[in-house]
Amino acid sequence: MPFATETFTPGATPFDSSAQSWPETLSGISKELECLNRDTELEFLKIGAKVSEFIDTVSCLSRELGALADIVSGEQGQRASDALTGVLEVSSEMRARSEEGGRLLGNMRQEAGRVRQTLAHFSGTVATFHSLGLLTRIETARLGSAGADFGNLAEEVRLLARNVQSRVESALDTAGELIPRIENALQEVSALQEGQAKNLPLVIAQVSENLSSFREMQAEAHASSLRLGAEYAEIGEAFKRVIVSMQFNDITRQQVEHVIEVLRRLNSETRPEDGALLIQTPGAASVLELQFSQLANTGNKFSSSVAAVAQSFDEIVNHVAKMVEESGALSGLSGKSSFFRQMERGCSAILSNLTLCANADAATESTSDGLAEKIARMRASIEEIRVIETQMRRIAMNARISAEHLGPAGEALSALANAIKVRASESRLGSDSLVETLEKMNAVVGDLTAHARPQAGKREAQEGCFESMRSAIAQLRDSQEDGASQIAVITAHGDALRKSISGARENLSAAARFGEVVDLTRSKLLAIMTEMRAGWSHEESQEGALGLAQFSKHYTMQEERDIARGTAAPAAAQSIDDVEFF
Amino acid sequence: MKTILTVDDSATVRQMAGLVLRGAGYEVIEAIDGVDALSKMTGQELNLILTDLNMPNMDGLELTRRVRTLPNYKFVPVVLLTTESQPEKKQEGKAAGATAWIVKPFNPDQLLAVVKKVIT
């Protein structure tokens, strides 16, 4: 390979070989190269330690950011979201129950009004019947004194009138007790239900809005997590490239060691025929030319590996900056402590409504129990009235028969008998209506009782649901508040890491030093080779008497062998399988 | 935790291999050559040996041969990690009892894939 094709890095110090002998120069070169190998390895070890530190810090940063995003988008956030959804469902159920309770109470109020109306009418009928009874007794007394025999009609009317009076009074008393009680209970329960009806829609709207905002926050945090994950993956890839590039130090170190070994051998081994040092023989020029080429390759390889490390560091710095920016986006989420306080207030409002609902249910249940008993008592009184009504009909019939026997003298009694019959029929209609109303009331009471009766475990489940919401939101708020201070720490970590990596990148002085030493060495080798060429003929300089192959036996890389063969073929070297299993 | 012995005269390579392997959860013991490796193997229960080929004092091929004579290490995988890529050298490695051959510079994912595949 002609020397003329080789070029030097601009700025390299030209070497004046005349000041030293070739062996001295080679010895000096060997020492400088040894020193270079030692120094660059030390510098690479320092960078390696920094890389290890950076990887740990990035990993820690990623964990911290992940934990931050996880507060809202992770398991904890999901718990809060589930709790909010549960609470919304329970609140909707409560509203439906409240509306149903209101409807049942409305029915009860309507039926109670009917009872009151029917009893008022009944009361008039009883008064009329009382009067008719009195008139019947007067008329039978008058006719009796005229010789008519009415048997015990007068006595029966008297007893019946008294019974009707007492039974209806009893029913009226019962109704009198029942109606105000119903009214009071209805008022109490209505007040509770109205409170619920007024508050619950607002509370539900608020919970619904909170849930919707929270889901938006979850989506934002999730998107942020994905972006963080992507940045972290990019950083991971950049670190892998750094690890690959760093290993070139080992490769160039070996190449330099091989050059040192050859130079030492040229300086220490002798030609058998005359005992001359190999460096003093013509073939040494070819050997030096090879070392010259090996060093050129080494220098290029080293500088490109350091450039790759620097580039990877730059990429890492950029990705770390993006991660820190992402923490800014997450800080937007963590600044929502007021949102969580609002959620907690909503939670308390729902709990108050739950208590209201429980009170309304208890009041309804207690009202229902009393109502059922009162309705039963009213039913019993009405049954007695109905027996009396039958008796009235029979008495009216007897009175009419007696009046028929009396002829014109019995006309007044006949009119009274008709009136009694009409009143008995009216009374029957009234009692039928009352029975019907009471049955409806009974049905409504049954519905109310069923509505108010606590379902097994339902209340506990509802309370558990609210409690889990309270605790999930409280935890979330605490975590968010911790997260806000954590972001400051993360940002500081991120900034420190960026500065540290940038510092390490700026201090990558190995490439410059390596380049300088390699260029200087090559300059020295070239100077010696030039002197050799001047002293020997071209043929002598090119002769392979020293046997280049023997100087190549320590090569450990295909690339070195390729250079030795004068056929540098990096493409061929790259095509070799990097991994092989035996 | 599985333990890997990395053997290399280059401190940089030991450092990089250690970084990758420790990061993947392995315990790593380091040795600077074959002689150092054999002394550090005493009393250890290793799951894999990752060794350079060209080293002073005792190279990777000799280390592999010696390891295969030790009853406790007869079946422990030995992965040669080297700048050498000549088929003849690979054949020597195979004959010595190596399990796999990786050419430097190694890619971290590739190294871990090989380790995962062969580790006992």
Image: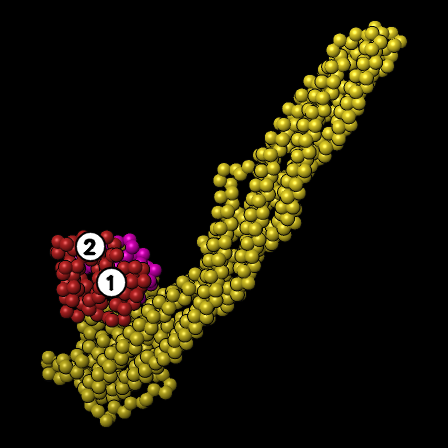
Chain colours: A yellow, B red
> Which residue is at the far right?
A408
Q: Which residues are magenta?
A: B92-118
Q: Which residue, as the protein is rendered here, is positioned at the far front?
A: A145
What residue is shown with label 2?
B76
- Please say if A295 is above or below B66: below
The quadrant where residue A54 appears: bottom left
- The crowding category of the residue bearing disc 1, from other C-alpha atoms within 10 Å (few below 14, some 14 to 19, many at least 20), is many
Along the polypeptide, which appears first: circle 1 or circle 2? Answer: 1
Residue at image location 79% in from the left, 20% down from the top: A134
Q: Residue at x 44, y 67 (%)?
A: A486
Q: Residue A238 appears at what percent x and percent y? A: 40, 67
- Mark 2 packing: few (<14 Cα in 10 Å), some, or many (20+)? many
Give the image location of residue A211, x and y in percent: 56, 53
Measured as percent of width and height from the top left, residue A316 is found at 42, 70
Left or right: A205 in relation to A63: right
Query: Left of B5 or right of it: where is A43?
Result: right
Identity of the residue drawn at 24% across and 71% down: B11
Per the image, is B106 magenta?
A: yes
User: What is the three-letter code of the residue carrying label 2?
Assistant: Val
- Gap between marks 1 and 2 measured at Cα: 15 Å
Residue A415 location, quadrant: top right
**Above or below, comparing residue A280 to residue B63 in the picture:** below
Q: Amino acid at mark 1?
A: Val
| Chain identity of mark 2 | B
Chain letter of the residue carrying label 1:
B
Establish whether labels 1 and 2 are both on one chain. Answer: yes
| Pointer 1 residue | B28
For label 1, the SS is: strand
Quick one: B109 or A341, which is closer to the camera? Answer: A341
Provide the secondary structure element on which disc 2 rests: loop
